[in-house]
Amino acid sequence: MTAFSFEIFSNSFLELLKALPITLSVGLLAMGFGLIIGVLVGIIRYFNVPFIDSFFKFYISFFRGTPLMIQLFLFFFGLPQLFPSLGRMNAFQASVIIMSINAGAYIAETSRASILSVDNLQKDAGFSIGLTKLQTMWHVQLPQALRVAIPSFGNTFIGIIQGTSLTFMLGLNDLMGLGKMRAASNYRFFEVYLAVGLIYFFITLLIGKLNFYLEKHYSKGRA
């Protein structure tokens, strides 16, 4: 049995940091676009628009009910067979798009539930001063709902970062992709994958700390 090599572990850790910008870029872009998609879908579902609501119900059910890996494969390898123009996308673009849509499905349900949690008296107060439904949503309900949703948004972001570990299967040289190549080259799987795992752990730990700070900051005065 070969003993654990701290030198290989530390060298792998430092080398893997080179792939950190790719992983963070995918994660941040997916979270940003996912927020836009999810909040808009959540608002539309709150207003219960006929037909459109049914479509978004299916969208949410599909992307929450199927593995992210299947979604990545369908979009990157499957759809170009039906729509050849999609074959021009690279792994980075495909990863951001599908992970944004996936995140949007989770954020949509969080957003809708958070809007529903706002007291109806707040909505009535908006109407009483002459605001329309959309104005009341934008100026009264949504700001309060988003504060409620911050913890769930943080958990979604952590899930996105962890989900980026699947993008190496599309050929993306992210943390997991570079780790897999390094482990295959030196056969020191434990040291390399331990380094990969610790980097993901530190990222999610930082996100958790930031999320706690935001939650504490925006909860001031909520009572």
Image: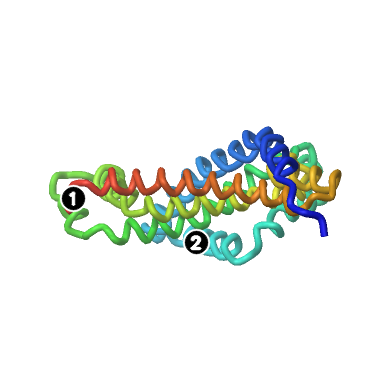
Evaluate whether residue 59 shows in this view: yes
Secondary structure category for the residue under label 2: loop
Give the residue at x 22% y 59%. Answer: 119
x and y percentages locating residue 1 in the rendered image: 82, 60
Secondary structure category for the residue under label 1: helix
Location of residue 16 by image quarter:
top right
x and y percentages locating residue 163 in the rendered image: 62, 52
Give the residue at x 63% y 44%. Answer: 97
Q: Amino acid at mark 1?
A: Phe
On the rendered structure, is 36 left or right of 47?
Answer: right
Q: Amino acid at mark 2?
A: Phe
On the rendered structure, is 49 left or right of 58?
Answer: left
Which residue occupies the foreground of this view, 171 or 103?
A: 171
Give the residue at x 62% y 34%. Answer: 21
Q: Quadrant of the C terminus?
A: bottom left
On the rendered structure, is 94 left or right of 211?
Answer: right
Q: Residues within 10 Å of mark 2 (few under 14, many from 20)?
A: few
Labels 1, 2: front one: 1
Which residue occupies the foreground of this view, 69 or 178?
A: 178
x and y percentages locating residue 174 in the rendered image: 70, 41
Q: Which residue is mark 2?
A: 51
Number of marks present in the image shown = 2
Query: Are the two marked residues, 1 and 2, in contact with CB atoms closer than 8 angstroms?
Result: no
Work out whether 55 lies above or below 215. Answer: below
Q: Earlier in the sequence, mark 1 or mark 2?
A: 2
On the rendered structure, is 28 left or right of 133?
Answer: right
Q: Could you say which disc has been placed on residue 127 in the image?
A: 1
Calculate the distance from the C-alpha at mark 1 to the C-alpha at mark 2: 27 Å
x and y percentages locating residue 127 in the rendered image: 18, 50
Q: Could you say which disc has been placed on residue 21 in the image?
A: none
